Image (spheres, grey):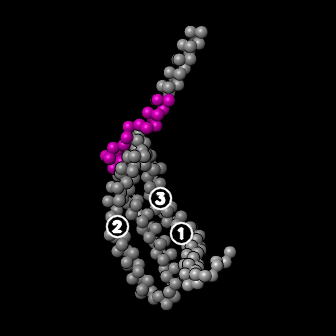
Amino acid sequence: MRKYLASGIFVLLLASASVWAQSSITAGEPATREDVTRLFGVMKSHDQVRAMMDSVLKQQRIMMRDVIKKQYPDTSEEELRHLDSVMDDFVADFPLDSMIDDMIPVYQRHLSKSDVAAMSTFYSSPTGQKLLREMPAIVADSMQAMTPRLQMIMEKMRERVQRAARDEHEKKANPTQKPMS
């Protein structure tokens, strides 16, 4: 009986140690601000975010022009260029460095020191560097591929909002009329 009890205790201790070790590995030492800053450097985060913003802006400009042309068909090319320059000015004033700095505590909350080290190793590798180089093109191509679907979705949403606004307006104008089901 003692033999079984001792074996049971040993198995429980072993299992507990395994769970403790696993949780220590999973949680790990928290990443420091310097760890995350180094990772952002390896990832060229500033350049990546800027390239993605430029890519998204290009697609947004196309979508915005289409929407404006549909809503205001007499809009001139000069007026559209002016709207483009307004968007460009907005992006130029975008506080990119501050936003990247704001992301550091988020990375620290979600990633351990070993996670950040592993990511730094990957992004320092030829494959990681290729992914970083290709990411702006991947995002641009993805946005281009999704644009027709997004435009349809936005058009349906615009129609729903207009219909809801019209129904609400009619309900206020005719408070005694019962809504149609």
Q: Amino acid at mark 2?
A: Phe
Task: Give above or below for 152 relative to 176.
Answer: above
Label for residue 134?
A: 3
Residue 174 on image: x %, y %:
58, 84
Residue 7: image quadrant is: top right
Whichever of labels 3 and 2 marks the residue nearer the N terminus, that label is 2
Describe residue 151's horizontal placement relative to residue 86 as left or right. Answer: right
Residue 149 on image: x %, y %:
59, 70
Residue 89 on image: x %, y %:
34, 74
Q: Is residue 154 visible?
A: yes
Label for residue 144?
A: 1
Quarter the N terminus occupies: top right
Could you say whether the residue bearing mark 3 is in a helix, strand or loop?
Answer: helix
Quarter the C terminus occupies: bottom right
Could you say whether the residue bearing mark 1 is in a helix, strand or loop?
Answer: helix
Check whether the beta carbons of the residues at disc 3 and disc 2 lie within 8 A of each other: no
Circle 2 sits on which residue?
94
Q: Which residues are magenta?
A: 19-37
Alpha-carbon distance for marks 1 and 2?
Answer: 23 Å
Residue 84: image quadrant is: bottom left
Task: Give above or below for 34 relative to 57.
Answer: above
Check whether the beta carbons of the residues at disc 1 and disc 3 lie within 8 A of each other: no
Q: Verify whether residue 21 appears in magenta.
A: yes
Whichever of labels 1 and 2 marks the residue nearer the N terminus, that label is 2
Could you say whether the residue bearing mark 2 is in a helix, strand or loop?
Answer: loop
Q: Residues within 10 Å of mark 2 (few under 14, many from 20)?
A: few
Q: Amino acid at mark 1?
A: Gln
Disc nearest the viewer among 1 and 3: 1
Disc nearest the viewer among 3 and 2: 2
Residue at 47%, 54% in the rendered image: 131
Q: Amino acid at mark 3?
A: Glu
Q: Verify whether residue 27 appears in magenta.
A: yes
